[in-house]
Image (cartoon, helix red, strand yellow):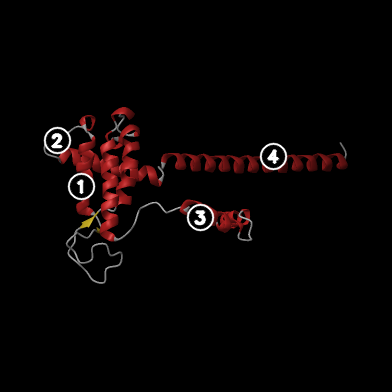
Amino acid sequence: MTANDVDKTLKDSQTQSRTLISKSQMDGETAAAAKKAVATVASSTSSPSRYEAQKRRDWDTFLKYLKNREPTICQCRCSGAHVIEFLKYLDQFGKTKVHVAACPFFGEPNPPAQCTCPLRQAWGSLDSLVGRQRAAFEDIGGGLPESNPFAAKVVSIYLKEVREAQGKARGIPHGKKKWKRPRAAKATLNADDGGGGRGSGVAALVVSATMV
């Protein structure tokens, strides 16, 4: 074997070594990236969303209330009346000022001074709570939809009454807005009348015929 053959063999060996090292590094980087992706997916799967976490906390609060209630009641025997009782119990932790009828600020959205009226849970908070508990009763508690006390009609009626009462006490209307006819439609109607007083002339004819 000549010296040139030896040099060529050494160069080929070095090239193969560098190729193997690069491939090994790429495989290591690929494995690390794959491991990181799996960890990210596992983390996102294991950690509940903000809604799910709040739903769990609300459900635990409800179960604690049923346990400390006298007499104690099981969730399977809970009715809409018990749900309303639970919502009233939560009023003691409310932060919304609801003026009583005798208060001088009753119906004032922005009272100029403080008063001794009680604090209550806002209607919106109760409505959201009932929505989460309706889902938690079936998802976490394993209850049937037809026996869900949070979906009872009496609960919906109670929430509606709370909304109306708080709206009056705080001067916040919750009624539906009146529909107004667009101006373009009104202009079209005027144009159809003839624009030259033709419509008013017809109206005058009708009035005259009525008087005769």
Residue 183 pos. (x, y %): 56, 58
Query: Which residue is located at x 61 percent, y 55 percent?
Result: 193
- Name the residue type under label 2: Thr
Q: Which label was assigned to residue 88?
A: 1
Q: Nearer the viewer, mark 3 or mark 1?
A: 3
Q: Nearer the viewer, mark 4 or mark 3?
A: 3
- Residue 155 lies in quadrant: top left
User: Closest to the observer: 67 or 116?
Assistant: 116
Q: Please tell me which of labels 4 and 3 falls first in the chain.
A: 4
- Name the residue type under label 1: Lys
- Residue 166 lies in quadrant: bottom left
Q: Quadrant of the N terminus?
A: top right
Q: Are marks 2 and 1 in contact (CB under 8 Å)?
A: no
- Secondary structure under badge 1? helix
- Secondary structure under badge 3? helix
Q: Which label was assigned to residue 20?
A: 4
Q: Nearer the viewer, mark 4 or mark 2?
A: 2
Taking the image as shown, residue 90 lies to the left or right of residue 29, namely left
Q: Is residue 55 above or below residue 107?
A: above
Q: Which label was assigned to residue 208?
A: 3
Residue 42 pos. (x, y %): 47, 39
Query: Which residue is located at x 35 percent, y 33 percent?
Result: 139
